[in-house]
Each structure stands twice: as C-alpha cells, then as structure tokens.
Image (cartoon, rainbow, N blue to C red):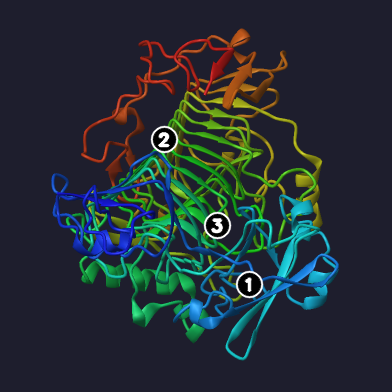
Amino acid sequence: MIYYVSCQSEKGGWGTKERPFKTIGEAAVVAQAGDEVVVAPGVYREYVNPVRGGTDDAHRIIYRSQEPLGAVITGAEVIKNWTLVEGNVWEARIPNALFGAYNPYTTVIAGDWYYSQEPVHTGEVYLNGKSMYEAFSLEAVKNPQKRESSWDPQGTLYQWYTWQDNGYTVICANFQGADPNKENVEINVRRNCFYPDKTGVGYITLSGFKVTQAATTWAPPTAYQEGMVGPHWSKGWVIENCEISHSKCCGISLGKYLQPNNENKWTTKFLKDGTQTERDAICQAQREGWTKENIGSHVIRGCNIHDCGQTGIVGHLGGVFSVIEDNHIHHINNKQDLAGAEIGGIKMHAAIDVTICRNHIHHCTRGLWLDWQAQGTRVSGNLFHDNVPPVGTKIADGLALGEDIFIEVSHGPTLVDNNFLLSPCACRLSTQGIALVHNFIAGSFTWVGMGTDNGGTKFPTPRYTPYHVPHRTEVAGFMTILHGDARFYNNIFVQAKVREDLKGYVQSRNLDAFSFYNFICGTKPYDGYPDPKTYFGQFNAQSTSDFGSKDLFYDHLPVYTGGNVYFNGAQPCDTEENFASDTEHEITWELDLENDHYVFKTNVYDFMPEIHAPLVNTELLGEAFEPEQKFEAPDGSPILFDTDYLGEKRPLQPMPGPFSKERNIQEL
C-alpha cells in the first residue's frame, strides 16, 4: 500500500493521494511491511519515530521524498521573538514547554573520550542555515573574539549564550548586524529526526530526503550511539540519496544500543579504563544477540553528508556487514568546538566486512577512522583530500593533525585499494593486518609502531583487542598489537612539500617527529621490520621451546612489498623489494574544482619508471596474522585487483597506482 504525506494537507488526512497525512509521523504509525510512504515537498518540523519495520529485503517499508531533497525533516524551530539588547546583541525567551523532556540548552555534551573542558550544549542557533558558536558568558557574546582553532575564524564572531529563567530558556546572540526577526533564525529543538526509539526496527528505506539540525549527543563506543538518522540496532536499512547536515554530534548512526550497566562507565564510575569497558561492551553485545542474522547489513549510498560536529557517520558493532558507497562526506568538525577521540567523516568501531567505496571525503578533521576490529573491511576507490586543518588554523588540543585514514588497534585483514590519499598525512597506522594496493599516496604514514597502549608509565598498559571468526561477529580471541603484518603493493608515493605550520605543531609539543608525526612519504617508517622470509624463518621447535626466546612471539610482524614507485624524495623502507625510485624529475599534481567536479592533474605518468608490478590477488596478500583470515570479499571469495579506480580493466602487467593506464588529466 502507498501512503501519501503533505505538510500542506488539512488536518485529518487519511494518507490517500487526495487526502494525505499532514505529518510523516502519522504515516509511520500505520505503515506495514511492504508499504511505501511518499512525502510531498515541504518542511517537516517533526521527529519521525518509525513504529515498525519491514520483514526482509523484499518486504521493507520505504519512505521516499516525492522530489529529490524536496522533503525536509528538521529538528529545528524558527524563532522570531527576538528583542534588541544592545549593538548587535539580541535576546529571545523560549518557554521550556517547547522542548518537552529533552532541553538541548540544559543538556551538556559529555562522555567517554570527550575532551573539551567547556560546557558545550547540544543546542545550536542557526542564522540562515549556518550554525553559530556557543559562548560561555554574556560578556563574550557582547565582545566576541575570533577562535583560531575554527576552520572559519570570521564565522566565530557569531556567538550565542544561554541560561534558564523561571521556566524559560533564554538565548542571547550576536548576529553581527543582521536583524534576526527578518532573517531565518532557527534553534534545534529535537534530539533526532528519523530514528526509531526502540531497537529491532529493521528493513527501512529512507530515500531522497533532506535531514538537518538535530540536538544529538556525544556518541562514543562505550555508550548508546545515536544519530540524527539511523537504524538503532537493527538490520537491513537503506539510506540513499539524502542530504544529511548540521547534526550537533553525529549525522547517521549505525551504532550501539543502550547498555544501562555500561553507559559512559569510564567517565561516570571512573574505576575501569575505557578500553576495558569497551571490551565489556563487545562481550555483552555478543551475549545479547549481536550476530550477522540480527544486526547490520545496512546500505548508505549517494548521500551528501556535511557540517556535523562529531561525525558524518558513526558506528560501533551495529554497522557490521554494511556498504557505504558513493557518498560525499565533507566539512565535519570544522567548528572544532567539540574535541575528543571519536571524530571524523566516518568513525567506525568493529567495521566487520564493511565495504567503504567510491566516496569523496574531504575537509574533515579526520577523514575515515577505523577503530578496533576492522576485520574484512575494504576501503576502495575513494577520493580523500584536505583532511587536515587548513593553513592558519590553530591545531586544537586533543584533535591532533588529522589524516585521510586512521586504522587503530585492529588485527585486520583491512584492505585499502585504488584510493587517492592526498592530505599531508595519508594514514595513521597504529595497527596491523593491513594491505595498501594500487593507491596514489601524497601524504605520510604516521604513528607506525606507536599508539597501541594506554599510556601507563608505571606498568605495561597494552591494549588487547578482539578478532573474530571470519565473516562472523563471534569473538575468536584477543591479542595486543605487535605492529607490521603490513602489505604495500603497486602504490605511487609522491612526496609533497611539508607545511611549515604542521612541522611547527610537532616541534612545539616536543614530539618524536619520526615516530609520531613522520612527514616522509613512503614506507620508510617500517624500517627495521623483518621481511617475511626472515620473520617466519626464526620459528622452529628449538627456538620456540621453553629454552628458546619468548621474544619471538612479541616481535614486530613482517612487511610485504612489491611494485611500488617513489617520487620527489618519497622513501621506501629498508627491506623494500621490487621497487623503483625516481630522484631526477619533479612530479606535480593538483586537484582542481571545475564546474562542480574535481579534476586530478599530474605529470607522474610522463616519468613512470619501468617496473614489473605484480598482478595482485588474494593469494599474493595471504592471511592477516592474528585472525588467520585472507584478504578476501565478505562472502569469502577471492579478490583479483584487475579493476582500477574508474572501473576499467587492468592489463595482466599492471601499472602502479589507481589507474590502469596513463591519465595526466582525469575527472574524479
């Protein structure tokens, strides 16, 4: 059955084409498996709480905007009762009854791995669709100062402050000369926009909507992870062709359900470290039905996700077996008023058999962060760039430099192939069990061999993380990170000029520049790691007996290489095999925005050296060491890397990099 919704409808509609429902929520109450809800263009200021879902892929409930992006679901309300205080400063008094049980202007963001010291609220004030900056005193609103850590310092002069007064939320805001009663000024009121309040509401499609302005809360892996949009611990959602923007914290959540006995336990009860409570959360979820049959297998495709405070997409455990494809994810955490260890364009824990492909991820504090259990995860055919704060921006404490991809304390196999990694820091690799194949890499690898313990100074504090039965959620074991077990085949490394402000950041903090923030492009940070023959040749009955060295079992794992080429001073590691290095020519590349499309221009193919690059497949890559799982497709079938970034076939003698043939100019 098809139900119709129009915000222009008279109250009392029946959901027919002639008498549509006025709200999407009315349709959500009656829709059954196999039904479709068609929503006419307009602004729907409501929280849509799907009461039920579909039963399987063939009998899902579909919510569809009649016109692409024509139907807008917003968590905000327009405020027009502003009175002038002085100069550019105005005041509005909003009765608390508007907010119900959840007031974003009394709810302070907090939780595990949240670092900001200022009492930031989940509320926002928007001037003509752009969020303003929360101040922490009335004086700061009257005399605003630029915030150097924002990616838009001039925009930080638009500030607001809030307090409570006799049942009213009072907001005082500096609109920098604009009249808020004539402009479009909104405040976010609702916590979510399209999100079931109970778990297990699966097989829903959300197609073609614009969803914006929700007062979401901080979403660490050891807490209930909510988003402006999301399936809330269920199976089989499709979120497609939507614009998702201006969530205070997270846009889309594929994350964890509420575990009342383990909700921000680290920062509320203080006794167990966050790493331990995360292990507890995983094991509890296992006992409570976290399986391939019940959870995950979602699709997020064709969406424009931007201007969210914490993440564009977040997930822990709930995103397993999902596909994230053909999305445009950009300008995440650019305000940098939120600080913590859960920030990025995409931030996923336990991305088991998740495929992240053909996305364009840029201008985020961090592009993609795969944390724990990136087992069977494939990152393929994506364009990453500008995922480091721009020149002139102060690097905020607790946010580090950012990078295109961060893979942390995972045992793999994690596959990164056919991508463009163009930010100054390409990958942060505090992990093992990885393979980088046929990428164009202009940035450096950071934190190699580092960042896998909990920072204790008196006792060892290694982080033991789980690995799983291949292509399942069941835990197979736990182990600390030995580092290595890394494969680099057929990549193009081009050393870019290192930004002086990034070098200054490292120097000002007295960090070991090579170990932490290495700026040398290439596999050079893996100097000293054994090659496979050396590593595996150490193990025999005598060397591993009780009289042998236990250190063998805790040494760095091997590094596998072949077919890589290095330009502009990019450097291979000291055990690199079958590589080529051009030290004679200057290689240039640029990414230009032309007619709303990015065009990649380079002269690298004018100077490509001859090299016998291998045709890479699952057999060549072998098994990730700890889970003993091959670099293979989610269904267990082998992968042959014979298709390039553009979907074209590679010859049997492939060329390094993401293209199958020379392309000095190419729209990406």
Q: Which of 55 and 96 is in front in this view?
A: 96
Residue beneath the point at 52% across and 79% down: 267
Amino acid bearing label 3 = Ile
On the image, which quarter does residue 192 sit in?
bottom left
Judged from the image, the secondary structure of the residue bearing numbered disc 2 is loop
Count of labels shown? 3
Q: Which of marks 2 and 3 is nearer the N terminus?
A: 2
Dot 3 crowding, Cα within 10 Å, few <14, some 14–19, many 20+ = many
Mark 1, secondary structure of its residue: loop
Amino acid tagged 1: Val
Percent across and percent down for residue 199 are: 26, 67
What amino acid is found at the position of numbered circle 2 in the picture?
Answer: Asp
Relative image position of residue 188 (x, y in whole percent): 54, 66
Percent x, y for residue 23?
34, 60
- Circle 3 — which element? loop
Compute the Cα span from label 1 to label 3: 16 Å
- In the rendered structure, the answer to whether residue 85 lies left or right of residue 473 reads right
Residue drawn 77% across the image and 53% down it? 153
Q: Nearer the viewer, mark 2 or mark 3?
A: 2
Disc 1 target residue = 120
Residue on which disc 2 sits: 326
Q: Can you identify the residue that label 3 sits on?
A: 343
Give the side of residue 652 with respect to residue 148, left or right: left
